[in-house]
Amino acid sequence: MLKKIIFSLVLLFVTPVTFASTLDLVAEGAILIEADSGTILYSKNPFSQFYPASTTKILTSYILLQDVVDPFSTVTQTQSSKDIVPADSSNIGLKVGDTYTYLDGIHAVLLSSDNFVSHDLAVFHSGSITEFANIMNDVATQAGAINSNFVNPHGYHEPMHYTTPYDLALIAKLAFSSPTLREIASTVSYNFTKTNTNTNISLLNSAKVLRSETEFFNEYAVAAKTGFHTPAGYCIVAYAEYDDISLIGVILKSDTENQFPDMNKLLNYGGSNFKSEVIDGNTLVFNVSYSYWAEPYVSYMLTNKIIEPSNANYKSYVTGEQFVKMLEKILPGMDGDYWDSFYEPHSLMYAQHNTLTGSYAKFILNKVESTLPRSIISWGVTSTANILDNDYITLEEAIYLAYQLYVDYLYASNKYWFIPA
């Protein structure tokens, strides 16, 4: 059995990731978290301000469901909603005076994003939009979303109605913890009943990641809410359950072609590279993005603190700077002054902003090895040769090269009995 590698127990901050990203998202803002612990697995501009558009309705629906007395209470489409909510808002075609149940209204909000129903439900719940917005901000703050502000229940654009990817992920984490909300947001189609005429309106979930007839269907996606207006761009928040981890993804300010592909890239990245496990009542997240062959080397480097726990993908590329720092930490017996030449601003070996190539890695390793008391390993003929022939070096490959240099160092120092197993 492979040893699991814990990468982070810090839940409230983004782990710095300086390795090249394996994701190519069009969205300007994005974040992926483990759904139970909130551990951040990927982020792009996580604390920048964005407009949430109709993803706002996740928070709205959560509040509406929290203290509902009777889910079958009758709600009426009001003239007030028609007067206040902009006429070009998304809607399911209700007229003033049409009635429906409270629960059907929430379906209209989450599946078809009806702004007029959102307005009437908020007033039904709290007496006024102002009071409902106050509740929204209180609940968001309690969830940890301290850099957001909400002024309406539907997300139609207002300059002071904003959030961040991180905040929206925390709100979604809270909202999707509600089984009822999760069930409604997972519903693909629904018959909404106008109780005053006893007629149905067919609702279809706008989140195509949930719909098997679309090219964007994701079999692991459980629940989702989309959003759009021009300043916000195309947005989506989704909850997914993979075999070994549950995820919440947020995509903000994407475009119409990439709204769903961006989300699928995000979710599949998390499902492929991370696992979670409950140990002693705590959810721990494990970075398993390394290849099978690399696991013992990654494990050794983490255990001995040569590399720091990270959400970086082990198959992403590294720079010369990162590689040299790794070598410096794994060879503590070498004179500290020796490494100074690697850190001069114009050092060829340092090349801190350049992706590490195989030939450049070989150059660095030969330079370091030449200083050892004696050498029994030639970097050109050992098992590292295949790696050094690569155009670019990945993190797991750099770890392996550093490990092999360490073995060489132990032999050269007559400490071969300390060679790690």
Image (tube, grey):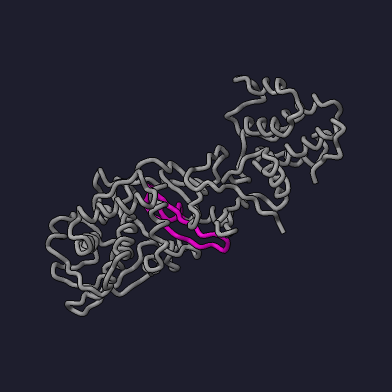
Check if residue 240 falls in the magenta segment: yes
Residue 257 visible? The answer is: no
Question: Which residue appears at 20% of the width and 73% of the height?
Answer: 74
The answer to whether residue 270 of the structure is visible from this angle is: yes
Closest to the observer, 141 or 362: 141
Tell me the quadrant of the picture where the N terminus can be found: bottom right
Position in image of residue 10 (x %, y %): 53, 46
Outermost residue toward the front in this view: 280
Quarter-of-image position of residue 222 = bottom left
Q: Is residue 288 shown in magenta? A: no
Above or below residue 198? Residue 51 is: above
Residue at the spot x=40%, y=57% of the render? 174
Relative to the observer, which residue lies in front, 166 or 255? Answer: 166
Residue in the picture at 20% in, 53% down? 130
Tell me how many marks there are.
0
Say whether residue 72 is left or right of residue 280. Answer: left
Left or right: residue 32 versus residue 349 is: left
Question: Which residue is rendered at x = 30% and y = 65% of the image?
Answer: 67
Image coordinates for residue 24, horizontal then vertical, percent: 50, 45
The percent coordinates of residue 335 (x first, y second) are: 74, 23
**Residue 354 located left or right of residue 331:** left
Q: Which residues are magenta?
A: 235-263
